[in-house]
Image: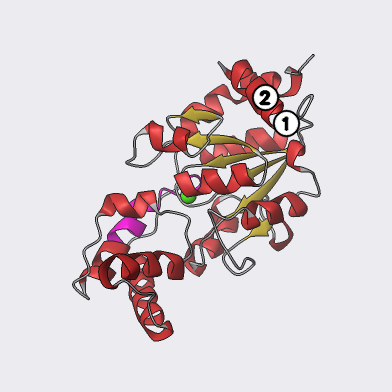
Amino acid sequence: MQKTAIKKFLLQNGLKRLNLQAVLFDMDGVLFDSMPIHAYSWTNALAALNIPFEEEEAYLHEGRTGSGTINLVFQRCYGRDALPEEIEQIYAEKTRLFEQHPEAPIMPGASEMLELVKKSGLKRVLVTGSGQRSLLDKLNLHFPGHFRPDNMVTAFDVKKGKPDPEPYLMGIRKAEAQADGCIVVENAPLGVESAKAAGIFTIAVNTGKLQDQHLIDAGADLVYASMSELQASWRSLLGVLRSTQLD
Ligand code: CA
């Protein structure tokens, strides 16, 4: 199963083998169990303007920039993009609702996974569309020794955001590697699309409310049910990632 997925990826990307140097981690829904709070905040910030937005949509569109999400909703409701002041108002309300909520818990298995990756001699790079300073500030507190500004890509670094490949292409550069030297851990369909468009082997962890098929359709090479399951499988998976090659 793992070996088949890796061989398929190598074939599609014209590679003989992976040359692993770094693991690129998404943040929301991977390191922090923050998506329920994001979904709640989006739904209620838009409900204040009588704009319907199901929580499942927050999971489907997870990874877009704030303005990207707001424009998508405005196009659906009003057939136009939102004005800059509308974007500012809605995103401010979304952020206010998010930040008044109790802190998002660490995703079970995330700390263990980061430590295992470190022990494996691989770099860790954060690639998030988030501009929630409260979460970014807490990375060092909850995951000490893993993330510094020079191995983080956030909403402040990119113009386009996921599903564009730009965030993960920047992640590859911050890893000082090539696409075949990286793997990605993502939980959202648009994040998977972004990583795959950057040419990276992508592991999806389905920590949210969507069916696995959304992640598979987005191009995920492997799907795990949780970060706990991924970290429990990491040693054997890493062995297969390092040893699998095309003849
Ligand atoms: Ca995510």
Give, as a three-letter code, the residue at label 2.
Leu
Q: Is residue 242 above or below residue 29?
A: above
Residue 99: quarter of image: bottom left
Whether residue 123 is visible to the viewer of this picture, yes or no, is yes
Q: Which residue is labeled 2 in the image?
A: 238
On the rendered structure, is 226 left or right of 118? left
Q: Residues within 10 Å of mark 1 (few under 14, many from 20)?
A: some
Q: Residues within 10 Å of mark 2 (few under 14, many from 20)?
A: few
- Residue ID at (48%, 27%): 229
On the rendered structure, is 185 left or right of 76? right
Farthest left residue?
A: 50
Instruction: Give the distance between the C-alpha atoms of the residues marked 2 and 1, in whole angstroms.
Output: 9 Å
- Residue ID at (49%, 29%): 223
Q: Which residue is labeled 1 in the image?
A: 120
Residue 73: quarter of image: bottom left
Q: Nearer the viewer, mark 2 or mark 1?
A: 2
Q: Is residue 5 above or below residue 109?
A: above
Q: Nearer the viewer, residue 60 or 235?
A: 60
Rendered-image quadrant of the C terminus: top right
Farthest front residue?
A: 79
Element under label 2? helix
Residue 239 lies in magenta, yes or no?
Answer: no
Asked if labels 1 and 2 touch by Cβ distance under 8 angstroms, the answer is yes
| Magenta span | 30-41
Give, as a three-letter code, the residue at label 1.
Ser
Q: Position of residue 198 (x, y in %)?
A: 66, 47
- Residue ID at (42%, 53%): 62
Circle nearer the N terminus (2, 1): 1
Whether residue 122 is visible to the viewer of this picture, yes or no, is no
Q: Position of residue 218 (x, y in %)?
A: 48, 39
Element under label 1? loop
